[in-house]
Amino acid sequence: MAAEVAEAEAADGRCRLRRFSCELGLLSRPDGSAAFLQGDTSVLAGLYGPAEAKISKELPDRAALDVLLRPKVGLPGVLERSREQLLQQTCEAVVLGVLHPRTAISLVLQVLSDAGSLLSCCLNAACMALLDAGLPLSALFCGVTCALQPDGAILLDPTARQEQEARAVLTFAIASADRKVLMVTTKGSCSVQEMQQCLAAAQRAADTIFQFYRDSVRRRYSKC
């Protein structure tokens, strides 16, 4: 099936995201794939499985999920391993692995360019790849990054430069069901009140991203 490209841009007084786009079914070998672009940050995701698992990794009651994050250049380092754990934690929270016991699911993410908000772009690419593969999910999820400026202002979907200038950078993984927080990671210092403000802004942005998901999938399958 030919890949379809969807694009969106969100901006209002309280929520401002860079332009983002998604292409589903870009790769032929994986069972599901997605290329996700946020501003100048882009990630390609491929989903393999459920497939036969190695005996050493086989789980009797659910599918074993592995996540591999490949940097744009060089070999994966400590930062990539840390992000792999966050991505795996998020995916395991929504994938209904109990429906596929004793199998293996592999999610491979390749960073194509990093211009800020990379982890949230990885989360969005991962969710779209899961959707494209048709895996059973309890909910969708999206990633939103917030940069807390020295004056207390909140920037959504910051660029790399904005992240460097920020007092704190927070990334949330938010589920479509009740906007529940599946994962949060922070860099820098912020108060509890500031974190709550960032979360509220991220949850508002999530509404826009989930609508974009729906539009992307609808556009792909409307021409079947």
Image: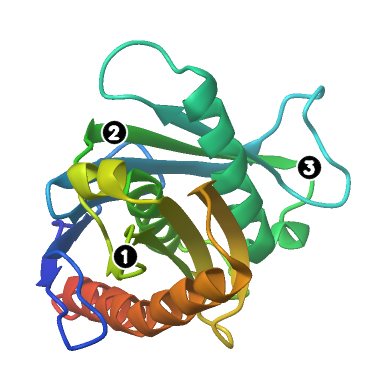
Closest to the observer: 55 or 211? 211
N-term-proximal mark, 3 vs 2: 3
> Mark 3 or mark 2: which is in front?
2
Q: Secondary structure at mark 2?
A: strand
> Contact (CB < 8 A) between labels 3 and 1?
no
Closest to the observer: 215 or 30? 215
Residue identifier under label 1: 151
Residue identifier under label 3: 102
Relative to 208, 40 lies left or right: left
State the residue at coordinates (72%, 54%). 100
Q: Is residue 126 visible?
A: no
Q: Is residue 29 above or below residue 153?
A: above
> Contact (CB < 8 A) between labels 1 and 2?
no
Q: Is residue 106 above or below residue 189?
A: above
* Quadrant in which the C terminus is drawn: bottom left
Relative to 13, 103 lies left or right: right
Q: Position of residue 168 (x, y in %)?
A: 43, 52
Measure how far apart labels 1 and 2 are at the Cα level: 32 Å
N-term-proximal mark, 1 vs 2: 2
Amino acid residing under circle 1: Asp
